[in-house]
Image (cartoon, coloured by chain):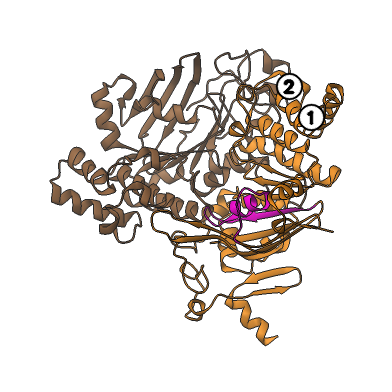
Chain colours: A brown, B orange
């Protein structure tokens, strides 16, 4: 069996070992009222310079899977993380809170969906960017100010000196998101996690920001994990794609494999739900009936079975494993479309 | 038959602190036939929601007219306006906020009929049964509360409640944008069915351009308070005339990675200008790849031809030549 590696990474020196290697990761969330198994036994890798898109719908666990190992969870929610999340060999699930804070600032940058809540509304934008340089890189005030101007220019903000004196609410949504990106890349991280970075924005601004992210990634040689529900965004930027449903990765492969030759019935449904550019006007829309399962009370078998058009007897008896299709690194967890083999797949 | 005719509608907001005026709808004109779905697209702040809200009476226009079902609404006294607008209903983006959280769905639907004067519980139940069927909902939801439903079910409850008023026109403001992609079809297909089976006309306000194209017979593109282009949706998307429509339709992402990875760079630079200080002349000129000096001089007039309308100097000249 050949070693599964993405072609784009083979040109990067030292790219043999993945930058990020996640194995057997599960996340339990304890809220006031329930215990939710938000992520169940997921495994994936991200190589230097590559973009992995994590696609799934609300509640699929895509955000929790990325943020819980970094110690980033909303207030009032306690997360218990098991498994391993290795970043350049270091297991983040074993790291102290102090160490995680260092990792978040320097090695991993994070861009959230809503920059208005991620920025401090009472402080001007300038000090918020400058403190990244002072605290994380130890620069003095003058050097931090100069760097802030340089980074705002880098993310395409005109008149950066003037913008540094603005409050977040004085900026448009697109510009605020550019500021967030500038803060996330300030320490030139190895990995950028972008969680729905363009979801709240208009299409024209979305396309500007996707281009910006792609350019910065190339310029800084970062790996990127892009969390999104938008299949069009995946097609635009992803090298590889993980599809999540009910806290599990149900399909994993290159963007071509996932988007052009999907195996899992859920992936197929997700793609079919995107309106086609040449569909007859007035024709009916395609989608799924029902809703995702309640993760505080998981059922036996494949989580997608109750909504699946291909469901068979086996599907409600046992959970299918991510299994390799013949002769490719394309994995799918489905009893029907990807017959299960005895051998465990290489991940 | 023209069900709704909006002519030269102006809606303004004043900034209390500076006194500056934002003309959210700037002499907007729009026609809707009975049983027709018409799309309204544009970026946040372009005035599309304000237009929808003005039609249903949630905003107070400064000037212009709204003729619905043959009645010139704005010329009527307030009480008569409400009466004239009874058969226009509004569907909000946030279905959770639109429903009372402690009230069961059944109680909410009965209440809507009681307000309309239906005193007979059996007649109400029968009517609710019909409406649930039209919105593809199961009667099991009647005993539930809004939070116990999925987003798609909840939005269909809002549509069901609106249908109890026997509307001729629904104004739907981003009705599916808070729903997951795979659940949007549940709601969108209800709209298509209502049009086909009950002849309901719909104004579909949305920023998802591909979705609007598939649902709407005609589409209007708004920019800074103006409708800059309108036309049959197939033709408008296949060959957008206004540079802004071109930029919008070019930003629609497909799902083929081999195509999308190599797509052209964005043509449209920058953000929407402040609506309190729009550019002189054509308000799109500051972001327009085809702008020239003459665009700053005067606002382009609408050129109307073959069911399409466009406001742009590029076509002003063609018109003069022809």
Q: Is residue A221 visible?
A: no
Mark 1 and mark 2 residues within 8 Å of each other at the beta carbon: yes
Q: Secondary structure at mark 1?
A: helix
Q: For this rendering, which residue is in front, B250 or B84?
A: B84
The residue that appears at 61% across and 40% down in the rendered structure is B93
Where residue A298 appears, as percent x and y from the top left, is 58, 14
Q: For this rendering, which residue is in front, B258 or B198?
A: B198
Tag 1 residue: B132
Give the quarter of the figure containing the C terminus of chain B: bottom right
Q: Is residue B272 visible?
A: yes
The residue that appears at 37% across and 34% down in the rendered structure is A18
Q: Please state the chain letter of the residue tagged with numbered disc 1 in the rendered image.
A: B
Q: Please state the chain letter of the residue tagged with numbered disc 2 in the rendered image.
A: B
The residue that appears at 71% across and 41% down in the rendered structure is B188
Q: Secondary structure at mark 2?
A: helix
**Left or right of B209, for residue B32:** right
For the magenta stretch, what is the residue range?
A: B36-62
Q: Quadrant of residue A60?
A: top right
What mark, if any, has residue A197 been given in the picture? Answer: none
Determine crowd level at label 1: few under 14, some 14-19, many 20+ residues with C-alpha closer than 10 A.
many
Cα–Cα span, label 1 and label 2: 10 Å
**Left or right of A162, for residue A196:** right
Do tags 1 and 2 sit on the same chain? yes
Tag 2 residue: B142
Where residue A228 appears, as percent x and y from the top left, is 51, 39
> Is B302 rendered above or below residue B52?
below
């Amino acid at each position: 069996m050949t070693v599964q590696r993405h072609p784009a990474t083979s040109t990067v020196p030292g790219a043999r070992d993945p930058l990020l290697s996640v194995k057997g990761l599960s996340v339990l969330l304890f809220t006031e009222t329930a215990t939710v198994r938000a992520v169940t036994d997921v495994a994936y890798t991200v190589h230097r310079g590559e973009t992995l898109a994590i696609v799934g719908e609300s509640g699929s666990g895509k955000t929790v899977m990325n943020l819980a190992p970094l110690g980033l969870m909303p207030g009032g929610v306690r997360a218990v993380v098991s498994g391993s999340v290795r970043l350049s060999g270091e297991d983040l699930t074993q790291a102290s809170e102090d160490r995680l804070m260092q990792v978040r600032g320097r090695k991993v940058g994070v861009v959230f969906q809503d920059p208005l809540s991620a920025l401090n509304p009472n402080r001007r934008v300038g000090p918020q960017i400058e403190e990244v340089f002072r605290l994380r890189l130890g620069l003095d005030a003058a050097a931090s100010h100069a760097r802030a101007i340089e980074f705002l220019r880098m993310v395409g903000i005109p008149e950066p000196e003037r913008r540094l004196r603005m409050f977040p609410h004085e900026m448009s949504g697109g510009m605020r998101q550019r500021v967030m990106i500038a803060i996330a890349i300030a320490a030139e991280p190895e990995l950028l996690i972008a969680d729905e970075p363009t979801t709240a924005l208009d299409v024209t601004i979305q396309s500007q920001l996707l281009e910006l992210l792609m350019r910065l990634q190339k310029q800084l040689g970062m790996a990127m994990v892009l969390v999104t529900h938008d299949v069009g965004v995946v097609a635009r930027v992803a090298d590889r794609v993980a599809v999540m449903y009910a806290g599990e990765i149900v399909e994993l492969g290159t963007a071509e494999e996932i988007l052009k030759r999907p195996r899992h019935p859920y992936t197929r449904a997700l793609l079919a739900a995107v309106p086609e550019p040449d569909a007859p006007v007035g024709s009916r829309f395609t989608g799924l009936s029902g809703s995702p399962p309640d993760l505080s009370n998981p059922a036996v078998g494949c989580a997608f079975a109750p909504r699946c058009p291909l469901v068979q007897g086996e599907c409600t008896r046992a959970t299918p494993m991510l299994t390799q299709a013949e002769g490719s690194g394309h994995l799918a967890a489905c009893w029907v479309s990807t017959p299960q083999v005895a051998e465990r797949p290489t991940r | 038959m023209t069900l709704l005719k909006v002519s030269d509608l102006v809606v303004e907001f004043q900034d209390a602190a500076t006194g500056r005026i934002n003309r959210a709808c700037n002499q907007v004109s729009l026609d809707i036939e009975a049983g027709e779905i018409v799309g309204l697209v544009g970026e946040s702040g372009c005035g599309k929601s304000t237009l929808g809200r003005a039609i249903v009476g949630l905003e107070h226009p400064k000037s212009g007219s709204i003729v619905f079902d043959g009645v010139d609404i704005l010329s009527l006294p307030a009480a008569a306006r409400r009466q004239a607008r009874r058969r226009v209903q509004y569907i909000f983006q946030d279905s959770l906020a639109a429903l009372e959280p402690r009230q069961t769905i059944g109680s909410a639907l009965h209440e809507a009929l009681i307000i309309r004067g239906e005193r007979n519980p059996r007649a109400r139940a029968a009517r609710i049964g019909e409406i649930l069927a039209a919105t593809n909902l199961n009667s099991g939801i009647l005993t539930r509360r809004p939070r116990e439903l999925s987003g798609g079910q909840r939005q269909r409850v809002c549509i069901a409640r609106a249908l109890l008023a026997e509307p001729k026109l629904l104004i739907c403001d981003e009705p599916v944008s808070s729903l997951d992609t795979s659940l949007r079809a549940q709601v969108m297909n209800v709209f298509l069915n209502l049009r086909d089976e009950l002849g309901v006309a719909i104004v579909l306000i949305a920023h998802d351009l591909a979705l609007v194209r598939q649902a709407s017979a005609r589409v209007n593109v708004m920019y800074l308070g103006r409708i800059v282009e309108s036309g049959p949706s197939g033709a408008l998307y296949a060959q957008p005339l206004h540079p802004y429509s071109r930029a919008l339709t070019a930003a629609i992402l497909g799902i083929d990675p081999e195509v999308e990875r190599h797509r052209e760079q964005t043509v449209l630079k920058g953000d929407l200008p402040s609506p309190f200080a729009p550019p002189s002349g054509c308000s799109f000129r500051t972001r327009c790849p085809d702008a020239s000096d003459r665009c700053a001089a005067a606002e382009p007039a609408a050129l109307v031809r073959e069911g399409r309308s466009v406001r742009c100097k590029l076509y002003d000249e063609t018109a003069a030549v022809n």
